[in-house]
Amino acid sequence: MSNALAIAHVTQALALLIENNLGPEFDQAVKVEPSKPPTEPSAEPTISVFLYQITPNTSQRNNDLPTRATDGTLVKRPAAALDLHFLISAYGEENELVGQRLIGSVVRTLHEIPILPRDVIEQAGEKPYLAGSDLLDSAQRVRFSPTVMDIDETSKLWGMLYQTPYSLSVVYQAALVLIEGRETPVPAKPVQRSDVRVLPFGTPGAPAPGGRALPVNEGAGSGSSQGGTSEGGSSEADAGPSSSPAPGKAVAKAPAKKTAAKAPAKAPAKATPATPARSRKAAQPAKATEPGTGGKSARGAAKRTPAAPAAAPDETENTTNGGS
């Protein structure tokens, strides 16, 4: 955690981080100022680090739970989680593209060193106006990440800077900065009594291996009863396979049921075509022609004389054979 000087301390440390890592590509002296962009740009190489917005951190804003007890005493210091938004712009001779070269150095530095180093924080804390800042003791490290802004957002941002001409710039977000309260919480009460017991499994009052605690009045007989139960269970398990029906019997019953079910279905199918077959065989001899009937069959003659009885199959065959 840190106090109220953490915001200014991060701004000063960011300016020192950029100044210390300009690199060998730029051989001129560069002035890095933690202030807003100037209304009259300078021809000398200059980088301005401007904190234009502070927003609550969305991931940590709900972690600050009620910090007071029921009687009103402070148990934990409240802490505000903040994100800092910086506008970094560069100025210089346009013919030599000084501004673009400086912006390239800034992007390389913050991409290579995204977390604020402790030595830079300690160096920035040497400023007299930052005396008393405890940002160095904070367990939370500040991390810089670039922010994407379109043309509309950029124009609105520079429109807030009254009479300030636009210059090539980049926007970075610093997270996370925690600011603690000033009150000192009540120290926690010391431990009055500590009770540590080590009991092996199976003893009265100790948990059983299955998760059930054994009652205190249950002695060693519980173990024997459990053992008897387990033995009984094992004997039942051993007797289980012997009492089950043999596989051969189950196989023998299945075909018997299928045969009984199929027998009634096949009987009508065989009896139905038997009768037409016999009638056709019996009707074949009746088709023979009788002498003196003009070539007509005996069947037709039988139809013309309804009073005559139908001849048996044997007599019809004899008559036909005799006529031939």
Image (cartoon, rainbow, N blue to C red):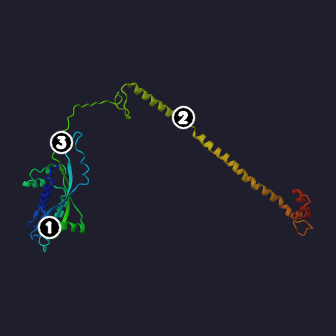
Q: Nearer the viewer, mark 2 or mark 3?
A: 3
Residue labelled with disc 1: 90
Q: Residues within 10 Å of mark 1 (few under 14, many from 20)?
A: many
Most distant residue in the front direction: 71
Q: What residue type is labelled 2?
A: Ser
Image-based side of 5 in relation to 274, left or right:
left
Query: Residue 187, relative to residue 322: is it above or below?
Result: above
Look at the numbered disc 3 and give the secondary structure of its residue. Answer: loop
All told, the count of numbered labels is 3
Residue labelled with disc 3: 185
Residue 135: x %, y % from top left: 14, 51
Q: Which of marks 3 and 1 is in front?
A: 3
**Mark 3 vs 1, N-terminal side:** 1
Residue 87: x %, y % from top left: 17, 63
Q: Which amino acid does label 1 sit on?
A: Ala
Look at the numbered disc 1 and give the secondary structure of its residue. Answer: strand
Quarter of the C terminus within the rendering: bottom right
Q: How crowded is mark 3: few (under 14 residues within 10 Å), some or many (20 or more)?
A: some
Residue 34: x %, y % from top left: 12, 61
Which residue is found at the position 52% from the left and 35% from the top? Answer: 240
Q: How crowded is mark 2: few (under 14 residues within 10 Å), some or many (20 or more)?
A: few
Residue labelled with disc 2: 242
Residue 296 figure quarter: bottom right
Q: Nearer the viewer, residue 118 or 179?
A: 179
Q: Label 2, label 3: how many angstroms apart (C-alpha)?
A: 74 Å
